[in-house]
Image (cartoon, coloured by chain):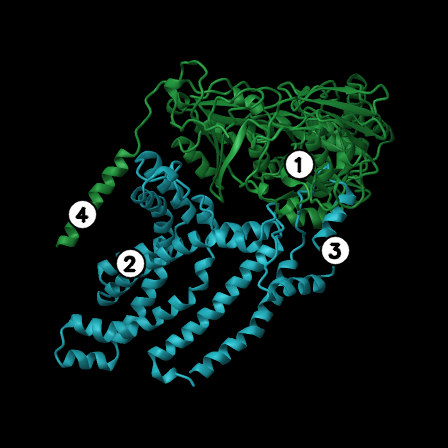
Chain colours: A green, B cyan
Amino acid sequence: MTIQKNLFSIIVIALLLVACSRTKDATRYDDPGKPAYGDTIITGSIGEPSNLIPLLATDQPSHAVAGNIYNGLVKYDKDLNIVGDLAESWEISKDNLSIIFHLRKGVKWHDGRPFTAHDVMYTYKVTVDPKTPTAYAGDFLLVKEAKVIDDYTFKVTYAKPFAPALISWSVAMLPKHLLEGRDITTSPLLRSPLGTGPYIFKEWIAGDRVTLRANPNYFEGRPYIDQYVMRIIPDTGTMFLELKNYGIDMTGLAPLQAVRQTEYPAFRREFNKFKYLAFQYVYLGYNLKHPFFKDKLVRQAISYAIDKREIIDGILLGQGVEATGPFKPDMWAYNGNVKRYDYDREKAVSLLNEAGFTKGSDGVLSRDGKPFEFTILLSQGNDVRIRCAELIQRRLSEIGIQVKIRVIEWASFINQFIDKRNFEAVILGWSIPQDPDLFDIWHSSKQGPKELNFISFENKEVDDLLVKARHTLNQEERKRSIYRIQEILAEEQPYTFLFVPYANVAIHKRFKGIVPAAAGLEYDFIKWYVPENQRRYKTHATVSP
Amino acid sequence: MLQYLLKRLLLMIPMMLGITLISFALIHLPPGEPDIIGAEMNPKVTKQVREQIRALYDLDKPLPVQYYLWLKRFVKLDFGTSFAQDRRPVISKITERLPITITIELLSMVLIFIVGIPIGVYCAQHKDTIMDKILTSFVFAGFAVPHFWLALLLMLFFGVHLELLPISGIKSFNFSELSLFQKTLDMTKHLILPIGISALGGLAGISRYMKNSLLEVLRQEYITTAYAKGLPEKVVLRKHALRNALLPVITILGLSVPGLIGGSVIFETIFAIPGMGQLFFASVMSRDYPTIMGILVMGGVLTLLGNLLADIMYGLADPRIRVG
C-alpha cells in the first residue's frame, strides 16, 4: 500500500512539474520596439551539418552554420553586388589579370590572433593541395601566382582574365595558425570551428543541435541576437509541429504549409512569413542524341504543349514563377526578353506536323513508322518533380505523345543513367549560381563522362559566347554575352525550363529587421533583433573571449 | 563445456570472414559510388579533382584489392574513416549513437515483455472470452497501424494541444542548466512517445507466442496431474505451466539481441533521435562503405553471440540438449 501511495504522489508531482514547466507567452509582437542585445534564435534543419570547415563540406546545413562563423574576402550584398568583407577594397590591374586585395586591419580570429594576408595565402594553398578532398579547388586552380605583399595586402594573378575571379575569393578564410602543417581532414576544427565571423562556436551535440554565441568583438559590430541554435529534425512533419509548438523559431515551409496550413489567426499572430525566389530552377531536359529530340521543332512543340502555369498553380500552389532560362528574374544576368512558350496546343501540333509526325488511327503520333513515345527519368524523393512529370505526361498524351515515368534512386540515377547518357528525357533541377557562369553546363567541351552537359548540347555561337563571358571582367560586356546565350537557349529549347520556386520561410514575430531581397533573407542576420520586452530566452551575458 | 565453448568461439572466425565477404560484395552490388566531396552534379569540380579524390580513397582499385585493404585494417580492429563529409572514424560515429539506440530498444523490449506476457497469459487463461478478443484485436491493431502516422497524431495531441510532452529530440533546449532530477525527468518525457509507440508494435508477437505456448503446456498431462492433486489454479499456472511456457519466449529474447543495435529509421527520423537507424540508412544511401561495413560487422558479431547465448541457455534450461 505504501509503495502505491508513493507512486501516486510521484505521479502527482511529475504532473505538476509538467504543468509548470511551460508558460504561454502572451506578449503581443506587433510593436517593432528598439534594437536590443539578447535572446536566442532556434532554426531547424533536416540534415545535420557534416563538418564545419566549409572547404570540406558541400551540404547546405554545414554552410548555413559556417556562414555565421567565417568570412570571405568579398561577399554579395542584398542585391547580389560584390562588396568587401575581410577585404576593405581591391584593385584590378589594367590587363584584367591580377587583383590586389587590401585587407581590413584589426580583424581578430575568435582566439584573439590577428587575421592577416598569410591566412589568405594558407587558405589558397590548402584549397589547391591535391591531398585536400574539396569540391572548391576548380576556381583557385586557375590562379597563376598568389603573393603576400605585406600583412594586409594580397595579390593574385591569373593566366587569362577570369570573370568569376573576384567572387571566388568569397570562400571562408581559414586560420593558418591552427591548421598549417596539420592534416586538415582530421583537424579538431571540423567539429569545433574557429573563424573571424559574427558568431563564435559554442557546442555541437551530435545529431541533435549546434549552438553558436555572438562575437562581441565582430568587426561590423556585435550581432543583436546572442545565440544561434540549429536543431536537427530530420522529418518535415515533425519540424512543422515543432514550429507550432515554439520548439523552433524559423523554418522553411513547403508550398502546402505556406499556403494552407499556416493560414489561421493564431499562426499569424505569432509568426511572420517571408518569401523570395529560390536560387533554383526545375527543367525537363532532353537527350539531344535521341532521334526525335535532335529536332528543334520537336523540343519547341513539347514546350508549347506543357502548361507551366498549371504546374505552378496546381503543384506549387502558386509558389513559383515560370522559368524562361537558367536564371531567376531578380538577377542582373536575367534576360526576360526571350522567346516564351505559353501553353498552346494547336501550335504544338502544327510544329510536330511540320517535323514530319503524323497521327495514326490509335491517336499516337509517329514518324517513319516509329511511334513517338519516351520515358521521363526522375530521381527518388522529390514529389514535386514526380507530380510535374504526371502533368506533363497528361498534356503530351493529349497531342499524341506517349510518356512513361520512371523514378530511380539517386546514386543509380546518376551512375547508370545520367553518366551513361542512358535516358531520353529527365526532370531535374539546377541550383542557380549567384555568379552567372554557365560554362560547365552548356559548353560543348563539357560532354565527357561525369561532366554536366549530359544532354549533349552543341552550339558554336553559345560556345564562343560562354568563353567570351568567362574571360571578361567588364560586367556590361559579360551581360551582353549572357543575354544572347539566353536568347539562343530559349530558341533552341534544349531544356524546357519549367519554373523557379519561391522559398517560403516562417520566422517568429519577435525577430525584427528582416527584409527579403534577391540574396534571400539572412544576408544581414547580424542586424536582426528582438526588442527587450518581447524576449523569450534569457541568455547569460556573453563572455568576451 | 569449456571445450565446447572454445570450439564454438573458434568456429566464429571463419563465419565472421564469410559475413564480411558477403556483406562487402552485397554493398557493392547496387550501382553508384560514394560522393566523397560533393562532386555529383557540381559544376565547380573538375575531372582532375575527381580522379585525385578517387585515388586518395582507393576507389580506383579493383574490388578484391579494396576488400583486402579493408580486411587488413579490420583485423587490427580499425574500421577506417567514414566516406561522409565529416570524415570521422567509423568507430566514433557508431559509439556516439549506440547508447541512445540501445537505451530505447532495451526499454521498449522491457515494456513489451512486461505488458505482452501478462496479456498472453490472460488470453490463454480466458481463451475465447470477450476480453480475449478485445485484447487480441488491440495488439493486432497496434501491430498493423502505420507507426509514423500514429506518432504524428500523438505528437500533435500530447505536444501541440495538451503541451504535456515534448515533440522531438531527446533533450530540452536548456538541458545543461537543469538539475539532475530535472534532467532525468526531461529525458523521460522525451522518451515516452518513442518507446511507447515502438513497444506497441512488438506486443502482438510476444503476447501471441505467450498465449500459444501456454495453451500448449496447459494441455499437457502433468498439468492435469497438478490439478488432480488439488493445487489451486494460481500455483498450477505460476509454478508448473508458466515456467515451461516461457522457454520459447526466452529464445526470442536471445534472438533479439542483434536487434538492440539496429534502431529504426522511421522512429528516429520522426522523433529526431540521433540513433543507429538513421546512421545506417544515411550510410547506405550515400554508399559510405566503411560505415556500412562497421555496422554490419557489429550486427554480425552480435548475431553470432546471440545464437551462442541461446544455445547455452537451451542447455541450461533443458538437460536433454546439453552438450559436451
Chain that bears disc 2: B
Lower sequence index among marks 4 and 1:
4
**Residue at 74%, 31% in the rendered image:** A301
CB under 8 Å between discs 2 and 4: no
The residue singled out by tag 3 in the image is B60
State which mark lies toward you, 4 or 1.
1
The residue tagged 1 is A176
Kindly report the distance in space between the C-alpha atoms of the residues bearing marks 3 and 4.
Answer: 65 Å
Q: SS for tag 4?
A: helix
From the viewer's perspective, tell me whether residue A458 is left or right of residue B139.
Answer: right
**Residue under pointer 2:** B115
2 or 3: tag closer to the N-terminus: 3
**Residue type of the residue flagged with mark 4:** Phe
* Residue B225, image x, y percentages: 19, 82
Chain of residue at mark 3? B
Please report, as a chain letter, where disc 4 is located.
A
Is residue A523 positioned above or below B6 on the image? above
Label 2 residue SS: helix
In the figure, B275 relative to A522: above or below?
Answer: below
Type of amino acid under label 1: Lys
Q: CA distance from mark 3 to mark 1?
A: 32 Å
Image location (x, y in percent) of residue A517: 59, 19
Q: Nearer the viewer, mark 2 or mark 4?
A: 4
